[in-house]
């Protein structure tokens, strides 16, 4: 059965796409810890990040770095946090979270809620 992320890749579920290439997709998390919280996923469904081949994992990190730098230019933050949890969706993914304090990347905190208009505004801000 296809994961939620595979359904996003295949266009069955819409997303707020930040960046994409032949191998990876980056999109805004709809349950973010912070404004601009983005997920980076491989387009091939692989459950565990450490099952991603070394070459693809290296490419995924470089792709994530480019996305993180795009976000940092438009979303006010001190740093870009990077996390791999891997329990929420059985599809390897990297969280990029704009940080102003260490608490901003505490996954046990309540998630933020933005309207679709606010999500679109955040997306357009990052892409502009």
Image (cartoon, rainbow, N blue to C red):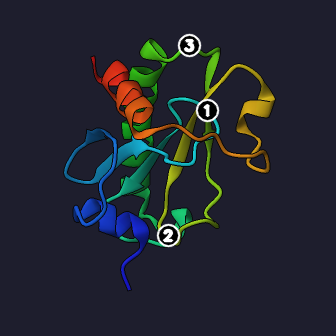
Nearer to us of marks 3 and 2 is 3
Residue tagged 1: 34
Instruction: Find numbered disc 3 in the image and state the secondary structure of the residue it sits on.
Output: loop
Q: Relative to the observer, which residue lies in front, 99 or 46?
A: 99
Please report the residue visible at 77 percent of the width from the left and 42 percent of the height from the top.
106
Is residue 58 visible in the rendered image? The answer is: no
Percent across and percent down for residue 107 are 73, 48
Q: Earlier in the sequence, mark 3 or mark 2?
A: 2
Mark 1 residue element? loop
Judge left or right: residue 90 versus residue 126.
Answer: right
Image coords of residue 84 (percent x, y) = 61, 52
Quadrant of the drawing holding the N terminus: bottom left
Q: Quadrant of the C terminus?
A: top left
Does the rendering let one see residue 5?
yes
**Mark earlier in primary sequence (1, 2):** 1
Q: Answer yes or no: do the residues labelled 1 and 3 have beta carbons within 8 Å? A: no
- Mark 1, residues whose alpha carbon is within 10 Å: few (<14), some, or many (≥20)? many
Q: Are marks 3 and 2 in contact (CB under 8 Å)?
A: no
Q: Does residue 48 sit above or below 127 in this rendering?
A: below
Q: Which residue is mark 2?
A: 51
Q: Which residue is mark 3?
A: 76
Residue 111 point in image, percent of width and height = 67, 45
| Horizontal side, residue 17 vs residue 89: left or right | left
């Amino acid at each position: 059965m296809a994961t939620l992320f595979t359904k996003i890749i295949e266009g069955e579920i819409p997303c707020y796409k930040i960046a994409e290439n032949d191998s990876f997709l980056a999109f805004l998390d709809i349950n973010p810890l912070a404004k601009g919280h983005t997920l980076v996923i491989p387009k091939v469904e692989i459950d565990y990040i450490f099952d991603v081949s070394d070459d693809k994992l290296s490419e995924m990190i470089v792709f994530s770095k480019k996305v993180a730098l795009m976000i940092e230019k438009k979303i006010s933050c001190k740093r870009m946090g990077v996390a791999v949890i891997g329990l929420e969706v059985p599809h390897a993914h990297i969280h990029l979270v704009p940080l102003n304090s260490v608490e901003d990347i505490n996954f046990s905190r309540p998630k933020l809620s933005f309207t679709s208009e606010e999500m679109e505004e955040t997306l357009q801000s990052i892409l502009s």
